[in-house]
């Protein structure tokens, strides 16, 4: 298996720093048992835990195993943005990645491709690695077109070199576990979509961009190996199962 990226999107969980610490302790213990992994493991806790999580990573063996991502970034760097967290602040915390354009922000909070494009440029200006989420609401006959448009609009104005610094996560909205009637995509269909995305992004970048494209949507210990066995799928973006301690550890154990 080629190197994979395993990204945990904790969303608005857990409810307390104590529970977050418990999760980090369990991950630390997992690695202390001598388990080797060639993969990159990135956790994206809510903003309120980022500073503490950064401290834990800096001061323990976990720092060699885990990297830190944020779940969003402010549009600009100016201080007059009540409730927002800027790229400047994230950079200072030592955060390396940032999820941009998650479907919960696109569809529940009305983030447009234009907003996502601005956030993407902002993240790059702070040397953060954007994990850009894309995906259709329904897999109907137009879904490829929807994705093509999202990609074009999201990466508008970026040159090939900038695009090469990004990650993409293909997350069909209907597959995200918290959505009514959600079910995971099949590995066979998701790899087709991932290949299509890789071709599209090459065109947009003007030729050669070879960026990691992950799958996300109801990934669990029971189905993860089906996705990662494809070399084209560079990893998984995991929501619910990334904060269920036993599930996350099982996934780390399966994808080594
Ligand atoms: P899920 O979430 O794994 O719970 O479906 C994925 C995501 O929303 O990033």
Image (cartoon, helix red, strand yellow):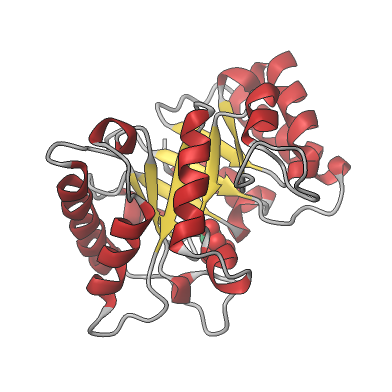
**Left or right of residue 142, residue 228 in this image:** right
81 or 216: which is nearer to us? Answer: 81
Q: Vertically, is 164 above or below 218?
A: above
Q: Vertically, is 238 above or below 55?
A: below
Q: Residue at x 44, y 50 (%)?
A: 132
Q: Vertically, is 174 above or below 73?
A: below
Q: Residue at x 27, y 30 (%)?
A: 161
Q: Quadrant of residue 39?
A: top left
Q: Residue at x 32, y 41 (%)?
A: 158
**Left or right of residue 102, residue 146 in this image:** left
171 or 5: which is nearer to us? Answer: 171
Q: Position of residue 43 (x, y in %)?
A: 60, 39
Q: Is residue 65 visible?
A: yes
Q: Position of residue 224 (x, y in %)?
A: 41, 55
Q: How many marks?
A: 0
Q: Position of residue 203 (x, y in %)?
A: 15, 49
Which image quadrant: the C terminus?
A: top left
Q: Position of residue 136 (x, y in %)?
A: 38, 73
Q: Quadrant of residue 34?
A: top right
Q: Quadrant of residue 29?
A: top right
Q: Ligand 1 appears in which quadrant?
A: bottom right
Q: Is residue 221 visible?
A: no
Which image quadrant: the N terminus?
A: top left
Q: Residue at x 39, y 66 (%)?
A: 135
């Amino acid at each position: 298996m080629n190197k994979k990226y395993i990204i945990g999107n904790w969303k608005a969980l857990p409810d307390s720093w104590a529970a977050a610490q418990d999760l980090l302790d369990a991950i630390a213990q997992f690695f202390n048992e001598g388990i080797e992994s060639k993969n990159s493991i990135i956790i994206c806790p809510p903003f309120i835990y980022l500073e503490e999580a950064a401290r834990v990573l800096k001061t323990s063996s976990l720092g060699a195993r885990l990297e830190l991502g944020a779940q969003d970034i402010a549009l600009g760097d100016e201080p007059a943005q009540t409730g927002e967290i800027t790229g400047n602040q994230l950079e200072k915390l030592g955060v390396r990645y940032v999820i941009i354009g998650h479907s919960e922000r696109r569809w529940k909070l009305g983030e447009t491709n234009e907003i996502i494009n601005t956030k993407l440029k902002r993240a790059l200006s702070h040397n953060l690695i954007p994990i850009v989420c894309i995906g259709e609401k329904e897999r109907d006959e137009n879904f490829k077109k929807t994705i093509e448009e999202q990609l074009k609009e999201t990466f508008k104005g970026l040159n090939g070199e900038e695009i090469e610094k990004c990650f993409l996560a293909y997350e069909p909205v209907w597959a995200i576990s918290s959505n009514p009637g959600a079910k995971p995509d099949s590995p066979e269909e998701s790899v087709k979509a991932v290949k299509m995305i890789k071709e599209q992004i090459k065109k947009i970048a003007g030729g050669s961009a070879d960026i990691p494209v992950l799958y996300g949507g109801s990934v669990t210990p029971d189905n993860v190996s089906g996705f990662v066995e494809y070399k084209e799928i560079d990893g998984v973006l995991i929501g619910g199962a990334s904060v269920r301690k036993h599930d996350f550890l099982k996934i780390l154990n399966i994808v080594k």
